[in-house]
Image: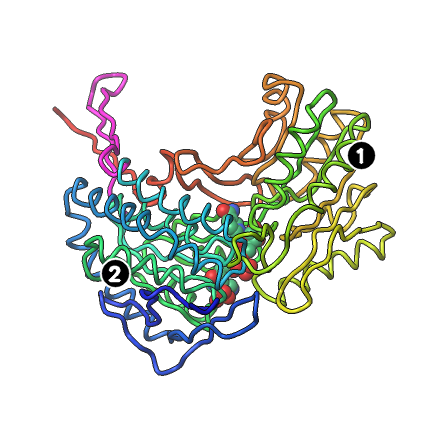
């Protein structure tokens, strides 16, 4: 098998009304590790997109009326198929996204878990029954599926960002049009094939891939048959989309960018902090909205932390993710890699000293991890979402100052706190403005937990008990019993 061989079941068409449609225009998908074209896929026009909306709208009539148990079973079968074929999913992720094999396997397992979690949640949506305080009526609170959901996903987690939306939407009884990112459409098409094999009726899921995501999305969002938008991507694009959804007052779930601070407080265990830093910074090669973006380390620990962190980064093997021995794969594209190098260049121009701890392969979108010590808070690397394996370290002396710097950003997705003990960690976490805080650990994501951000990192929550409610309308009945 060539290194670029795709799994046998890799659809390349548009999924509309249960049929794989081959559009005349084709879009190349490439492997960032080799820069070779993997395959060509469909390029949807506005008219294809509206056909997908029509199909989702028609399917909603029956799908929303199915038993929750039946929807749960389709989700459960999707989990089982995905788990049985997890290596195919990981292979596709590696080939189109570039990440290391271990990261891709981790993502594929995590992605499948959303099907399992929401197969369990589908049958547990709770309403409410109460008497009004003056007993003049009863209050019944019910939940109804919203309708057609338009979903837009990014390239950094091509499987998990799709299943984190699809599973709760289908559990709730909604139907969907999914538009994956241009760089990584194949994994989403593969997930759609899994769901078809699990018995998802035609039209419930439609997938469009396109080179014109702006006009296609604008037409979809203007269509009165679309009931909600679920977007994961940059804050910049999220704001553009919110302007469009505002025109129709469309509910909008937004999972946007991050600028996660990683605090190592006085008295923290340095080895544990380095272990956590390696996960928080390096999972997905640093291309994660949850990636630790800036490290604030107490002056008493900064020397030990920096030296050990640098040694751990140096030990990473860099190369194509398809070789399972490599720890750090390619960035998603040469363009993304160059954006990161540009930030490194700006930091150096500001007087910082970025040090590449190893050498990256010359061919392909690879980049070596860099460590940058003595960084000034407020400089380029602390203000921008780096999205790559660059670790800027700021030294602090006073805990209040560290918390102030952590909060000094328009973002508020996740933060990491390494403290003397969990009690101190929680006390500090309560003062941090982010939707999630990992305390004495380097990862927080879990399908059973509410994922989402404060401030410009987003609106709403995915996963957990909250996730299904992004696709349900609350309806109140005032009843004279
Ligand atoms: P992006 O540029 O915002 O793209 C995300 C998606 O939006 C892609 O599918 C893209 O399609 C589409 N898009 C771009 N311009 C559009 C427009 N004008 N109208 C409609 N859709 C449009 O983000 P990215 O570079 O793929 O992903 C990285 C960003 O996502 C980072 O900021 C990261 O923090 C964030 N992210 C957040 C979370 C979270 O849960 N909070 C999770 C993962 C990633 P095309 O590819 O076709 O342009």
Q: Give the range drawn in magenta.
A: 121-145
Q: Percent x, y for residue 405?
A: 73, 35
Height in image: 320 above or below 108? below
* Pick the front one: 238 or 70: 70
Numbered mark located on residue 112 in the image: none
Asked whether 140 falls inside the magenta stretch, the response is yes
Residue at 55 percent across and 45 percent down: it is 457
Label placed on residue 395: 1
Along the line of sight, the residue nearer the viewer: 247 or 342: 342
Residue at 62% in and 65% down = 365
Residue 396 is left or right of residue 422, and the answer is right
Q: Nearer the viewer, mark 2 or mark 1?
A: 1
Query: Where residue 235 sits in the image (x, y, percent)?
Result: 56, 53
**Residue extending furthest toward the right:** 351
Q: In this view, does 239 lie to the left or right of 14?
A: right
Residue 7: percent from left, percent from top:
36, 64
Q: Separation of disc 2 and disc 1 at Cα?
A: 53 Å
Secondary structure of the residue carrying numbered label 2: helix
Residue at numbered disc 2: 56
Which of the two labelled residues, at mark 2 and mark 1, occupies the earlier sequence position? 2
Give the mark count.
2
Q: How crowded is mark 2: few (under 14 residues within 10 Å), some or many (20 or more)?
A: many
Residue at 69% of width from left, 45% of height from top?
313
Q: Residue at x 47, y 71 (%)?
A: 29
Q: Is residue 419 left or right of residue 202?
A: right
Residues at badges 2 and 1 in contact (C-beta under 8 Å)? no
Q: Nearer the viewer, residue 312 or 32?
A: 312
Residue 30 part of the magenta-drawn span: no
Q: In which quarter of the image is the N terminus?
A: bottom left
Question: What secondary structure is found at the residue carrying circle 1?
Answer: strand
Residue 85 position within the rendered picture, expressed as x and y whole percent measured from the top left: 33, 53
Indicate the quadrant where residue 124 lies.
Answer: top left
């Amino acid at each position: 098998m060539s290194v670029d061989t795709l799994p046998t079941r890799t659809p390349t068409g548009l999924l509309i009304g249960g049929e794989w449609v081959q559009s005349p225009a084709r879009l190349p998908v490439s492997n960032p590790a080799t820069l070779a074209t993997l395959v060509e896929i469909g390029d949807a026009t506005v008219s294809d997109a509206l056909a997908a909306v029509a199909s989702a709208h028609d399917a909603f009539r029956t799908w929303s009326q199915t038993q929750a148990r039946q929807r749960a079973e389709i989700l459960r079968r999707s989990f089982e198929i995905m788990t049985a074929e997890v290596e195919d999913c990981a292979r596709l992720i590696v080939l189109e996204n570039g990440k290391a094999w271990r990261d891709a396997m981790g993502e594929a397992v995590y992605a499948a878990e959303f099907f399992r979690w929401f197969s369990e949640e589908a049958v547990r949506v709770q309403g409410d029954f109460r008497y009004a305080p003056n007993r003049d009526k009863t209050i019944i609170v019910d939940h109804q599926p919203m309708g057609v959901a338009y979903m837009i996903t990014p390239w950094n987690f091509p499987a998990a960002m799709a299943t984190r939306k699809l599973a709760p939407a289908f559990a709730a009884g909604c139907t969907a049009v999914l538009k994956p990112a241009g760089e990584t459409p194949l994994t989403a098409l593969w997930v759609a094939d899994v769901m078809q094999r699990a018995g998802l009726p035609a039209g419930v899921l439609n997938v469009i891939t396109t080179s014109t995501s702006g006009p296609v999305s604008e037409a979809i969002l203007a269509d009165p048959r679309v009931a909600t938008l679920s977007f994961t991507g940059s804050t910049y694009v999220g704001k553009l989309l919110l302007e469009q959804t505002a025109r129709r007052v469309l509910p909008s779930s937004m999972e946007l960018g991050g600028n996660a601070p990683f605090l190592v407080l006085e008295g923290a265990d340095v080895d544990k902090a380095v272990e956590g830093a390696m996960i928080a910074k390096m999972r997905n090669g640093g291309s994660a909205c949850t990636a630790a973006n800036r490290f604030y380390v107490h002056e008493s620990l900064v020397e030990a932390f920096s030296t050990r962190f640098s040694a751990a980064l140096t030990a990473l093997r860099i190369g194509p993710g398809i070789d399972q021995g490599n720890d750090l794969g390619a960035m998603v594209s040469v363009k993304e890699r160059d954006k990161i190098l540009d930030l490194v260049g700006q930091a150096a121009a500001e007087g910082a000293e970025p040090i590449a701890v190893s050498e990256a392969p010359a061919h392909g979108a690879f980049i070596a991890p860099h460590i940058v010590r003595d960084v000034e808070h407020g400089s380029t690397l602390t203000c921008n979402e780096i999205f790559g394996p660059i670790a800027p370290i700021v030294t602090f002396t006073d805990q209040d100052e560290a918390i102030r710097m952590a909060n000094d950003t328009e973002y508020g997705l996740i933060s990491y706190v390494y403290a003397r003990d969990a009690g101190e960690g929680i006390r500090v976490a309560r003062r941090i403005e982010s939707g999630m805080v990992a305390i004495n650990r380097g990862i927080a994501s879990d399908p059973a937990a509410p994922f989402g951000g404060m401030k410009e990192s987003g609106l709403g929550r995915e996963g957990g008990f909250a996730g299904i409610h992004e696709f349900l309308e609350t309806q109140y009945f005032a009843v004279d019993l």
